[in-house]
Amino acid sequence: MSKLKEIRELKNLTQEELAESSGISVRTIQRIEAGTIPKGYTLRTLSQTLGIEESILQNIPKEVIQEQPTEKQLTEEKAEEVIINYSFIKIINLSSIPCILFPPLNILVPIILMFKLKQKNNLSKQIITLQIIWTIFAPVIFMLWIFLKLRGNYTLGILILIFMSNLFIIIRNTVEIDRKQNLYYKLNFNMI
């Protein structure tokens, strides 16, 4: 005997009465009682109408149900992952400033803070990715300037300009995080 038929008879309902109260056709109810497993809209509607869990109509053993996380648990886990503390994001972003002169640290310090503050989200990953890109391109630009000896000897000036560009990116992103809770300078990818 199918679960639907068993439950329907326990509630003293005929197939026609169940069809009328649920909006599901009598033919569909007959198919389910004959052995077809309900899915989607039909499953949700019948379980709501009968006041039972969907898994009962699918003949899933209770042991399997208990092993699988419920929808509520999955939602709570996702909510924990998605919580963004914008004050912490600003701290992660600003942590690169003291380390601008020591390029590996301008990446490591924000990474450590990201994990310590539990802010492993897209914004913090973007901040770190920007620092990685800057750390790669800053020496390349500096070396090109030296080797090409472009218009005079402004080596110290270009070095200051490179470091100021990173400082500007960090400060501009901090202002944007404060205003719109987003980054002003961002990339379409993450390196971490």
Image: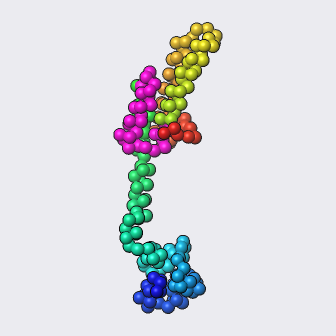
Q: What percent of the width, then of the height, locates residue 13?
A: 47, 90
Seen as rendered, the residue at the extreme left is 116
Q: Going 39% across and 61% down the picture, which residue do you hit?
A: 73
Q: What percent of the width, then of the height, locates residue 132?
A: 50, 31
Q: For residue 117: magenta? A: yes
Q: What percent of the width, then of the height, locates residue 59?
A: 45, 77
Q: Quadrant of residue 7?
A: bottom left
Q: Going 43% across and 79% down the picture, which residue do you hit?
A: 51
In depth, the one of 61 and 17 nearer the eye is 61
Q: What percent of the width, then of the height, locates residue 90?
A: 42, 37
In depth, the one of 11 and 174 nearer the eye is 11
Q: Is residue 77 something one can see in this rendering?
A: yes
Q: Is residue 17 above or below residue 171?
A: below
Which secondary structure dominates the residues rendered in magenta?
helix
Q: Quadrant of residue 67?
A: bottom left
Q: Going 58% across and 40% down the picture, which residue do you hit?
A: 188
Q: Going 47% across and 84% down the picture, which residue do you hit?
A: 2
Q: Is residue 157 above or below residue 111?
A: above
Seen as rendered, the residue at the extreme top is 152
Q: Is residue 92 something one can see in this rendering?
A: no
Residue range (magenta): 99-127
Question: Coloring scheme of the render?
Answer: rainbow
Q: Would you say 72 lies left or right of 143 here?
A: left
